[in-house]
Image (spheres, rainbow, N blue to C red):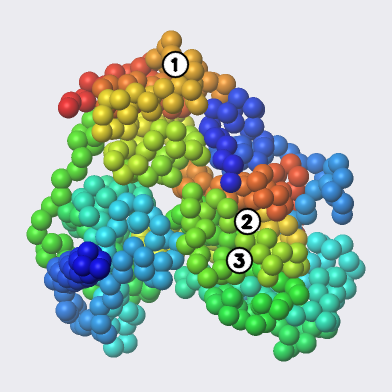
Amino acid sequence: MKSNLSYIKFIFAAFVLTIITMKALSQNMKNFLPEEVYGYKASGSDINYSPETLFGYINGGAELFISYGLKEVVSRTYERCGEPKIVADIFDMGEAKNAFGVFTHGREKLDQTYGQGSETYVGAILFWKDKYYISVFTDEETEASKKAIEEMAAMIDDLIESTGELPPILDWIPEEGLVPESVFYFHHYIWINAFFYITNDNFLNIDETTDAVLAKYGKPESRHYLLMINYQSGEEAKTAYYNFLEHYAPELRDEIAVKLEDGKWTGCLLKQDLLICVFNAEEKEQVENLLDKTAGKYCH
Amino acid sequence: MTRKTITRRKLIKKGALASIGGFLYLNSPVKAMKTISGTNKQAGWKSRVILIRDKDLLTDFNKPKPDRILTMIDQAVVALTGKGDPLEAWKEIVKPDDILGIKTNVWNYLPTPPELEQAIKTRAMEAGVRDENIGIKDRGLTREPLFQEATALINTRPLRTHAWSGVGSLIKNYIMFIDNPASLHGDSCADLASLWKLPEVEGKTRLNVLVMLNPLFHGVGRHHFSKEYTWEYCGLLVGFDPVAVDSVGIRILQAKRKEFFGEDRPLNPPAKHVFLADTRHKLGTADPEKIELIKLGWMEKSLI
C-alpha cells in the first residue's frame, strides 16, 4: 500500500515537472516573438502545440516535423486593420541538426538573409537558427504584410541570440561537383528517397541514432547522388553495409562500383562507422572519385 | 501487413520501366497505351479515366465559372458511362432513393471548389435524389448521420503533394471516416486504401472527381503550401476507380515537377499508398497499361 502511494507520488511529481518544463520552454520561445511589428499587433493568446496536438494545426504535415524530433511549437497571430493576418510559428526541434534537416526539405537555393539559412516565398519566410525552425506567414501578400513579415523575421532572428552546431557528417561532403543547395539531412528512413528512389524499406537501419545526408552532384543531365550514413558504431555500419550488398548490389562484394541494368554505376564503401553510397553515375570513375573523396574527408 | 522490399535495383532488373512501380517510384515514362475498353475485368479490361480541361474555366485561383464546371462534369460522366446525354449518365451514377454523401475537402489553401460541389448536387437532384438526402462534408463524418447511413458516395478533392503521404488525393480523402487519422500515418500512410474497406465506405463510391484546377506540385513550409508551386491546369480527372484516377493525377504532377525543376524530381516521399492500393489492397489499378485515358477539351500542355 505504502509503495503504491510512493509510486503515485512519483508519477504526480514527474507530471508536474513535465508541465513546468513545457511551460518554461514555451515561455522561452515566446520571448523570441515580438509584440508589435510594422503596425501589426499580437492578437489573441499564443497557442502551443506538442507532437501529439500538432496534427490539429497542420494535419499530416505534422509527421514531417515529428520525424525530426519536434518538441514543441508556439504560434502567434498578428493583426493590423485592413491588412491580412500574419502567423509566426517557432518550432523547437530539440537540436540544431533537426531544425536544419526540416529546413533542407524544401530548400531550392542558398540564402542566409535570416538565421543560419532562410528561404523566401510569396507571403512566407522560413528560416532556421540554433534548434529552432521559424515560419512567418501571411495568407495574402500586400505591401504592408510583405514588409511586416520581413521585419518580423529579422526581429526573431535577433531575439534568438544563440546559433547551432551541425553534426560532423556535413563537413565530409566533397565540394567538387556538388549542388550546394541540395544537401539534405535526415534521420528517418522515409526520407531516403528524397531525390532518387532507392528503397521502400529500412534495411540500412536509419533511425534517430544515425546521421544521414543526401546530396546531388553534376549537371541535371548527368545527375548522380551521394548518400552517407554515420552510425553509432563500426559494427552497426558494417551490418548496414552487408544489408546494402544483399538487398541492392551483391556484386559490390568484389568491386567498389558496379554497372546496373539501366547502364548507370553504383558504388558503396565502408569507412569505420560511416557508410558511403553513390548512385546513378554515368562513369565508374565518378563513383570511385566521390567515394574516395568522401572517405578522405571523413575524420573521427 | 506483409512488407516486401522494393528497391530501385529490383525494379530496373525486372525491366519495370513501363509498369506501376516504374512510374510511381522511378518516374519512368509510360509506353503508348492500347485503347481497349470494356466493363468487365476480363483480359484486356481497362479502367477508364476521363481528363477534361477548359482553358477559360477560372475566374480566380481555384475558382471556376459555375456554368463551365457544370458542363465539364457533365461531359466527363457522359464519356465515363458511355450514355447519350448528361441526365441519362447521372441516372446511371445515382438513384432516386439514394442517400448521397458528397465527400469534399476543406483544406484552407486548396479546398474542393463550392461551384463543383454544387454542380454535383444539382445533377444528383435532377437524377432524382432528394435535397434532404444529400450531404456535402469533409470533417466529422463519424458523427454525421447522413454519411453514416449513406447508400452512395461521390468523392471529390483537389490533387496536391503531401509532406508525409507523397500526395493528397482521392484514396486519402476518406481518412475522415475514422476518428484518429494519425493511426494510418505509419510508413508514410502506406495503407490508406484500407479505409475503403470500412462498412461506411465499402462498395458505396459511385464517382471519383479529382480536382486539377490549380494543383500543388511541390510543398514548402509548415503548411506545405505556396502558390508559387501551383499552376493553372484547369482540369478534372473523373473515374469509377480511385486508384486509376490518382495514378493519372500523379503522372501529371511528376511531369510538372520535371518541367519546373528541369530534372526528375520524384515525389518526396513516394506516393506508396497508391502503389499499395493496387498491389496490396486490390482497390483498383494504378498500372498505366491498364488504364484507358480519355481526353476531352483543351489539351495544350496536358503533360500526359
Q: Residue at horizontal 26%, vertical 22%?
A: A272
Q: Amino acid at mark 2?
A: Ala
Task: Choose between A221 and B37: the one closer to the eye.
Answer: B37
State the image coordinates of residue A126 (x, y, percent, origin top left): 28, 60
On residue B174, the disc is 3
Q: Residue at horizontal 59%, vertical 76%?
A: B141
Quadrant for residue B245, please give it: bottom right
Circle 2/circle 1 CB separation < 8 Å? no
Q: Residue at horizontal 69%, vertical 67%?
A: B199
Quadrant for residue B225, please give it: bottom left
Task: Choose between A251 and A231: the one closer to the eye.
Answer: A231
Q: Residue furthest right?
A: B84
Q: Which residue is mark 2?
A: B193
Q: Which residue is mark 1?
A: A252
Count residues near mark 2 (Cα–Cα under 10 Å), then give few for <14, some for 14-19, many for 20+.
Answer: many
Q: Amino acid at mark 1?
A: Leu
Circle 3/circle 1 CB separation < 8 Å? no
Q: Chain of mark 3?
A: B
Above or below, A32 against A231 in this view is below
* Left or right side of A150 for B95: right
State the image coordinates of residue A5 (x, y, percent, origin top left): 22, 69
Real-space CA distance between mark 3 and mark 1, rounded to the nearest whole angstrom: 44 Å
State the image coordinates of residue B188 (x, y, percent, origin top left): 49, 51
Q: Amino acid at mark 3?
A: Tyr
* Left or right side of A240 for B281: right
Asked if marks 2 and 1 fall on the same chain, the answer is no
Count residues near mark 1 (Cα–Cα under 10 Å), then give few for <14, some for 14-19, many for 20+.
Answer: some
* Left or right side of A181 for A28: left
Q: Chain of mark 1?
A: A
Q: Quadrant of the N terminus of chain A?
A: bottom left
